[in-house]
Amino acid sequence: MKPTLFETILRSLYPPRCLLCAAPVDRDFGLCPPCWRDMSFISGPACMFCGLPIAADKLEGPTPCDSCFRAPPAWEAGRAALLYQHSAKGFILAMKHGDRTDCFKPAASWLFAACQDLLTPDTIVTAAPLHWRRYLNRK
């Protein structure tokens, strides 16, 4: 879709920047190549509860990691898109404590991709509410 005149002017005044380092990028809500390379995406076999990677060549069915096997969580299944390290840690902290709502869109798409095997037509996804005092502390 062709950008409107307003969008063209807006992009010339405020060009898209990397969400982590503010380097120029091709489109809004993107990461520059170095930040993208440093992002710790999870791929391959993962724990059925916490979504962390499991060191295994071949798994037969849903498998918990050692931690979740010893102390199973209260939920049925979970996924994670990122490991909490390197650029991913900064990205998560920016959303959690930095009020960086511009990070929500890419985070949602990464989580959606990570959850594909869990989603069914009757799946309900909801946000965990934040206590009002904690919300005020963040503002």
Image (cartoon, grey):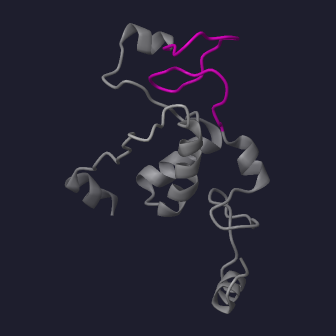
Given residues 41 and 63, the one toward you in this image is: 63
Q: Does residue 106 appear anywhere in the picture?
A: yes
Q: Does residue 81 appear anywhere in the picture?
A: no
- In the picture, which quadrant includes the C terminus? bottom left
Given residues 104 and 18, the one toward you in this image is: 104
Residue shown at 45%/29% (left/top)? 78
Give yes or no for residue 117 being in the magenta stretch. Answer: no
Q: On the rendered structure, is 88 left or right of 97?
A: right
Q: Quadrant of residue 39?
A: top right
Residue shown at 58%/54% (left/top)? 106
Q: In the rendering, at what x and y percent does residue 134 appear? A: 26, 52
- In the picture, which quadrant includes the N terminus? bottom right
Given residues 51 and 138, the one toward you in this image is: 51
Given residues 130 and 137, the one toward you in this image is: 130
Q: 36 above or below 47?
A: below
Number of numbered discs: 0
Which residue is outermost to the front?
121
Q: On the rendered structure, is 27 left or right of 74?
A: right
Residue shown at 55%/13% (left/top)? 61
Q: In the rendering, at what x and y percent does residue 49 appear? A: 44, 23
Q: 58 above or below 124?
A: above
Q: 14 above or below 104?
A: below
Q: On the rendered structure, is 34 left or right of 16?
A: right
Q: In the rendering, at what x and y percent does residue 97 appear? A: 42, 53
Instruction: Identify the main secondary structure in magenta.
Output: loop
Magenta region, residue range: 40-64
Give yes or no for residue 48 being in the magenta stretch. Answer: yes
Q: In the rendering, at what x and y percent does residue 51 appear? A: 52, 27
Residue shown at 68%/61% (left/top)? 18
Q: Quadrant of residue 46?
A: top right
